Image (cartoon, rainbow, N blue to C red):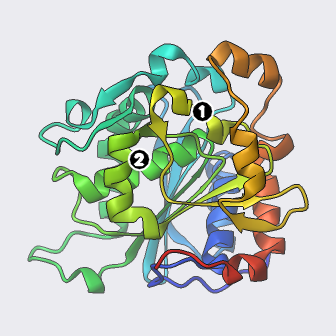
Amino acid sequence: MVVMPFDANATGFSANNALLLARLCTAAYLDNQPARAVAQQLGLTGFIWIDLTQQFEDVYAIAAGGPGFVVIAFRGTKDFKNWMTDLQASPVSFPWLFESGPEVGAIHAGFGHALRDAWDKIAVAVDNLVPTPDVAPDMTQLPSLWLTGHSLGGALAALAAGVFSMWSGAPLRSVNGIYTFGQPRIGLYQFCGNYDHLLSRRTFRFVNNQDLVPRVPFRGWDYADVGQMIHFGSDGKPQLESSSWTNFLSRTFLSFKDFFEIAGHLQPDVGDHAMLGYEKLVESQADALNALKYQT
């Protein structure tokens, strides 16, 4: 495995960073020890396995440190119906889950509960890899924090970025980059607007061709997107907010029943939603990705 240099201080897009994060997302689907081995091959140390199964079956995260940075990579779930239900997708106020948090809007209940239930484990993992100084820290001297994930894991990564950035109960950490792959939507318009005000320039949301998962929960339910969307077309070439994706979005799904009639056999490891496919596209399109004009 060729290890590309990771820019720990980047705040804009980096294809090298995207590739390492994509590889960690792929590794997150492995068991504990094989995932640890991949992290070591990538030059990462201090590996921590995080159990997120209280809300969703078979969902985990891995945390690992590199030279000057720390990454948390969230695994998706193998069963989409675990979170694609009317009940799980119902919105809930951010401070209802993250107590005493700001009134920044409503988030996906299932994702929010999963993250809140596991937050102490996530905070401990970060503190173990980046000990909190006894005195007020100089944030520029701390290792940078990076969040990534695929599918439901991408939603957890993006939502975690919002929590680190908006909630006083989170460890004192700024997030340098959020890279997600095949990520579903995490909140309603107000929350997503507040998220983007803080993090849009550091959030890169990859969508492969006609991957259905980034289309849910539906815009008709007042869910919105966050960050900068990078769409790989049918030819594998990346574009920002491409016309082909806009045309695909114009097809309307009225309910999860409609969605499952189209995607009844959708699996996390096949078709346009497969994490390995995302990883290969990021690797093969590195120059084209770096050439795109991102928000700065």
Tell me the number on the disc at residue 159.
2
Residue visible at 66% across and 74% down in the picture: 42
The image position of residue 230, as x and y in percent, is 66, 62
Q: Is residue 45 left or right of residue 78?
A: left
Element under label 1? loop
Which is closer to the viewer, label 2 or label 1? 1
The image position of residue 137, as x and y in percent, is 16, 78
Tell me the number on the disc at residue 216.
1
Instruction: Bin the neighbour count of mark 2 within 10 Å (Cα to Cα): few under 14, some 14-19, many 20 and up.
Output: many
- Amino acid marked by disc 1: Val
Residue visible at 84% across and 73% down in the picture: 284
- Compute the Cα span from label 2 to label 1: 15 Å
Seen from the viewer's position, the closer of residues 267 and 36 is 267
Indicate which disc, 2 or 1, sits on the residue closer to the N terminus: 2
Q: Is residue 245 left or right of residue 144?
A: right
Q: Is residue 102 left or right of residue 186?
A: left
Q: Quadrant of residue 175?
A: bottom left
Seen from the viewer's position, the closer of residues 274 and 129 is 274
Residue visible at 19% across and 83% down in the picture: 138
